[in-house]
Image (cartoon, grey):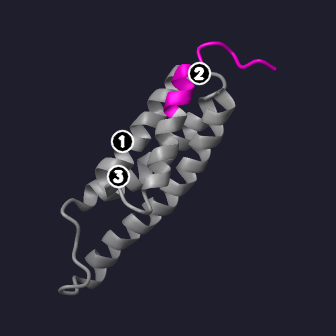
Amino acid sequence: MRNAALVLGIIGGLWAMVIGFFGYGYTVFIDTYGEVPDLATQVQNPALIKAAGFLAPILAIAGGAMARSANMVAAALLAVAGVLVWYAFGFGVFTMFPIGMCMLGAILALAARQPDPH
């Protein structure tokens, strides 16, 4: 279970990184070039998008990397990363996989009380 949490956390973190790049880039693009009515408008809270786009992938990758040695801390980091992506970017076609991977990784890391059999 710890290995599955490790893989899910790292893959979820990489997907969250892609979403973070686009979210951060979108807010900076609108700040720089302005809004286009009926096409591209600024989000309500650009600071939240920028912070979540930076923190969520780091938390997910760190949680995945810790899953084998510190499963409780890994579960907390993965859960926070999943919730942060959901809160900042919503649940949609591009965010459902990183959210699902981070949350499932958190559940598996939490359930792995004993070391995995070798």
Q: Is residue 88 above or below residue 42?
A: above
Q: Which mark is nearer the camera, 3 or 2?
A: 2
On residue 70, the disc is 2
Q: Which residue is at a point 38% across and 65% down the rendered structure image?
A: 23
The magenta segment is: 106-118
Disc 2 packing (10 Å; few <14; some 14–19; many ≥20): some
Q: Is residue 92 above or below residue 77?
A: below
Disc 3 packing (10 Å; few <14; some 14–19; many ≥20): some
Q: What type is the residue that disc 2 sits on?
A: Ala
Q: Which residue is at a point 40% across and 36% down the rendered structure image?
A: 80
On residue 83, the disc is 1
Q: What type is the residue that disc 3 sits on?
A: Ala
* In magenta stretch: residue 29: no
How far apart marks 3 and 1 lie (CA) works out to: 13 Å
Q: Which mark is nearer the camera, 1 or 2?
A: 1
Which tag, 1 or 2, sits closer to the chain's start? 2
Disc 1 packing (10 Å; few <14; some 14–19; many ≥20): some
Q: What type is the residue that disc 1 sits on?
A: Val
